[in-house]
């Protein structure tokens, strides 16, 4: 559609607004990522500017820890239920989800480090996410294994949506929701895996006012 | 550093209003295009139910954005985005099968998801950004489901990061 739709002045804004939005993080859209565990298509990150306020640093740090926690959770699930996941055609999806979560953690870490904040080590975990024990995982019903993964992805997506209102730096909201929407796609993909289109339609009809909910955000106690 | 007021009245600028107005127009265009698609009689029961669900979502999104405009004493657009309509409506009207209709729907959803993703960096009022952030992942899910119905590869359905290439923000 990019080629067929004119790129008219969608928002009627000037170059100053664009520069403010992209420059707030000390970023140039033409600069290469500043390293980390991203996938190479991440945000253009420039030199450290120290522009992040403490609250934003705290939120990004918790999101990195959360991504690493969910990635580990998917790995545990694949280990405990490898045959069942294979039979349900879900192995590839869970592997992909895990890769995404590590890429998300990498990109968020890049944002922190490139702005002079401390990064999160790979073993960092989010204390607010209580993961099932090995015994609890083993006690899942086979039919519930993908739903378990979906539940994690949904909590993650809701957390991202909820965080947007609390971020102080506007440019971070886009970076965060580039990830949050990917988590929401994971949720819908799980719906299709488990119950095809009817299952997705059921979930879609339950969205409050057609919006992605936030009541299961992991950052809200 | 950019400060972020939490309420519209704290930072009522023309950019914010134009952005929300344009978003409401995109939602209205989506509703009109899906009604056109549903009227073609080319869809099976599943695709019909899917598009009816999408119409409901987009109607609700338009209402949400309209409420935001009304809160600022601005008028709510009742016409769809003319560029999106001009781009997609002819494809819908000429479609001869379900796959072509759904591919046109995919263009609509990809446009909305990408545009909202990109625009999220530009909203100065936190509550506006929060509203758009509740809509954007729903559009992203629409993209995925339509893509799955069309048999698109997993790499397209599940990007690591929500793409913005289809955004109608000025390049």
Image (cartoon, rainbow, N blue to C red):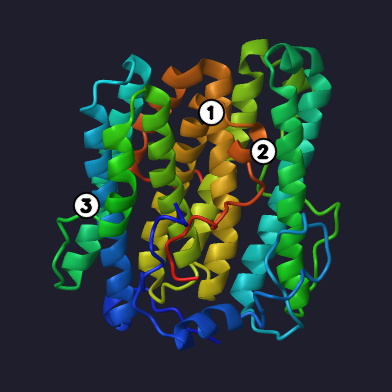
Q: Is residue A177 visible?
A: yes
Circle 2 SS class: helix
Q: Which residue is mark 1?
A: B148
In the depicted view, which residue is nearer to us: A43 or B9? Answer: A43
Q: Residue at left 43%, top 59%?
A: B116
Q: Residue at left 49%, top 64%?
A: B118
Residue B66: image location, x then y, percent? 21, 59
Residue B60: image location, x then y, percent? 25, 45
Mark number displayed over residue B155: 2
- The chain to which mark 3 is attached is B
Compared across the picture, whether B77 is left or right of A137 comes to left
Residue A55: image location, x then y, percent? 60, 73
In the depicted view, which residue is nearer to us: A221 or B154? Answer: B154
Q: Residue at left 79%, top 13%?
A: A83
Q: CA distance from mark 1 to mark 2?
A: 11 Å
Q: Which image quadrant for residue B32?
A: top left
Circle 1 SS class: helix
Q: CA distance from mark 1 to mark 3?
A: 28 Å
Q: Are marks 1 and 2 in contact (CB under 8 Å)?
A: no
């Amino acid at each position: 559609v990019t080629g067929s739709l004119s790129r008219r002045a969608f928002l009627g804004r000037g170059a100053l607004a664009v520069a403010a939005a992209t420059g707030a993080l000390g970023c140039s859209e033409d600069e290469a990522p500043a390293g980390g565990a991203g996938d190479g298509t991440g945000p253009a990150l420039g030199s450290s500017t120290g522009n992040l306020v403490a609250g934003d640093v705290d939120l990004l740090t918790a999101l990195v820890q959360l991504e690493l926690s969910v990635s580990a959770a998917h790995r545990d699930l694949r280990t405990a239920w490898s045959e069942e996941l294979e039979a349900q055609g879900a192995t590839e999806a869970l592997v992909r989800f895990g890769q995404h979560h590590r890429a998300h953690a990498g990109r968020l870490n890049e944002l922190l480090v490139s702005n002079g904040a401390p990064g999160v080590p790979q073993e960092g975990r989010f204390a607010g996410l209580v993961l099932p024990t090995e015994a609890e995982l083993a006690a899942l019903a086979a039919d519930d294994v993908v739903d378990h993964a979906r539940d994690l992805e949904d909590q993650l997506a809701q957390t991202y949506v909820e965080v947007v209102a609390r971020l102080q730096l506007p440019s971070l909201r886009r970076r965060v929701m580039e990830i949050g929407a990917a988590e929401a796609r994971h949720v819908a993909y799980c719906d299709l895996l488990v119950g095809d289109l009817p299952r997705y339609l059921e979930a879609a009809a339950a969205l409050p006012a057609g919006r992605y909910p936030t009541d299961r955000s992991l950052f809200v106690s | 550093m950019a400060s972020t007021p939490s309420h519209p009245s704290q930072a009522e600028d023309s950019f914010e209003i134009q952005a929300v107005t344009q978003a409401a127009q995109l939602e209205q265009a989506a509703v009109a295009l899906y009604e056109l698609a549903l009227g073609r009689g080319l869809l099976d029961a599943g695709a019909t139910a899917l598009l009816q669900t999408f119409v409901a979502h987009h109607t609700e999104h338009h209402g949400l954005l309209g409420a935001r405009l009304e809160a600022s004493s601005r008028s709510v657009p009742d016409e769809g985005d003319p560029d999106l309509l001009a781009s997609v409506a002819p494809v819908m009207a000429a479609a001869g099968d379900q796959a072509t209709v759904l591919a046109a729907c995919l263009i609509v959803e990809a446009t909305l998801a990408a545009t909202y993703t990109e625009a999220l960096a530009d909203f100065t009022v936190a509550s506006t950004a929060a509203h758009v952030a509740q809509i954007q992942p729903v559009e992203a899910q629409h993209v995925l489901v339509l893509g799955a119905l069309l048999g698109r590869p997993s790499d397209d359905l599940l990007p690591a990061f929500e793409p913005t290439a289809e955004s109608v923000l000025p390049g």
